Image (cartoon, rainbow, N blue to C red):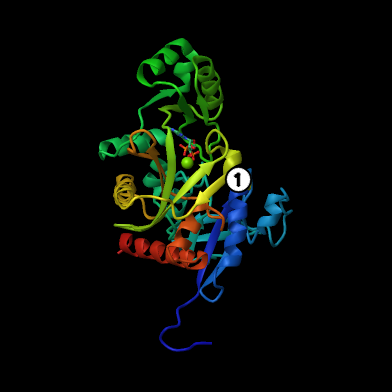
Amino acid sequence: MSGGAEERPRVRLGVLFGGRSDEHEVSVSSARSLMHAVNPERLEIVPIGITKRGAWLLGQDPQLLTEGIVPAAGPDSVELVPDISHKALVPVHRDGLDHRTSVVDVVFPLLHGPYGEDGTVQGMLELAGVPYIGAGVASSAVGMDKALMKALFVQAGLPVTTYLVFQAHEWRADPVAVLNRIETQVSLPAFVKPCRLGSSVGISKAKTRDELWASIALAVAHDRKIIVEQAVRGREVECGLLGNHIPTVSVFGEVIAHHEFYDYEAKYTDGLADLIIPAKLTATEVSGLSEMAIRAFQAIDAAGMARVDFFIESDTRRLILNEINTIPGFAPTSMFPKLWEASGLSYGELVERLVELALERYAEEHQ
Ligand SMILES: Nc1ncnc2c1ncn2[C@@H]1O[C@H](COP(=O)(O)OP(=O)(O)O)[C@@H](O)[C@H]1O
Ligand SMILES: [Mg+2]
């Protein structure tokens, strides 16, 4: 044991994983990796599994959630609730609310998509008065909503591809009018996306008017707000950001998907996409993209971390901003941790840095 002034107290890091979104399994596997990668002398991981139906279970083994096993009532099936009067997430035992001490110091909402990355969990953590990793409520909500995100990017003068937004009810009332509107504003091929999902769920590429119809039918099954974007032909590059004010930019990575685009399968099946780190870019491209990444982070008022994704258009070499992700994929094989590893920060150090940033932001906001 190294004694003396350098010794820091061990932080209890609540890792929220699983959840109600389509990205439940992705989150579970990231959580499992994280639990084994951190330095136990610095961080005590408190696993908090969220079932697909939304129950919060303290001390849950991620493996069990993956297998769909929900423990029966018992000492290890404790649910957690926010308790603002104690600034805590408190366990509610089956025998009632009798344990008034928090079980965590900081929470990592390692949840992707709706009910995790979209500000809802962040709002609950704000109510509970518990510090947490990553963006706050509004920023998370904006980062999850491709229409709101793009609107803020445009307002900040950041380059995005031509796009149009419509509501599912408009489609149901008059699909031909919606198709006509799309065809006058966006040229095909185009990407049709539910505004508030992730991992490419519900996204498809349409090359013809008939395909556009099918793409929209798919998207409206997932969300009531739809975005149609002109397809960019070019390379896909990404970077990681860390910080609360002017974030540090990682090295860049390139995604080469072996499918038509970086769809759900390509994202999560070995061998269907290559991640090239560092991406082969000119110094001018790196500085242009880095500046855009920081501006994108600030445009949505992100905090802690983000991954920013770009296109470099083949014909023009134009840099185009695709999106910002406030809770990027966090498996050791995911782009975000790999980018930081290539930038000199190991997976465990990355988690420690995120905890520090969460505590700093909390202190700043609760002076
Ligand atoms: N406008 C576009 N032009 C070209 N490819 C696109 C476009 N929009 C999306 N894609 C492809 O679809 C993938 C998923 O789209 P994205 O907007 O990043 O959604 P998600 O939030 O689900 O990751 C991208 O990684 C890219 O491969
Ligand atoms: Mg994406």
Q: Quadrant of residue 80?
A: bottom right
Residue 102 appears in view: no
Kind of residue indicated by mark 1: Tyr
Q: If the image is split into quadrants, where does the C terminus sit?
A: bottom left
Count residues near mark 1 (Cα–Cα under 10 Å), then give few for <14, some for 14-19, many for 20+: some
Residue at the image position 71 percent from the left and 51 percent from the top: 70
Q: Is residue 255 above or below residue 348?
A: above
Where is mark 1, residue-wise?
268
Q: Is residue 101 above or below residue 146?
A: below
Residue 154 appears in view: yes
> What secondary structure is found at the residue carrying circle 1?
helix
Q: Position of residue 178 (x, y in %)?
A: 43, 15
Q: Is residue 306 above or below residue 272?
A: below
How many numbered tags mark residues here? 1
Q: Is mark 1 within 8 Å of ligand 1?
A: no
Q: Position of residue 152 (x, y in %)?
A: 31, 38
**Of 48 and 210, the residue lying toward us:** 210
Residue at the image position 49 percent from the left and 60 percent from the top: 107
Q: Position of residue 349 (x, y in %)?
A: 47, 68
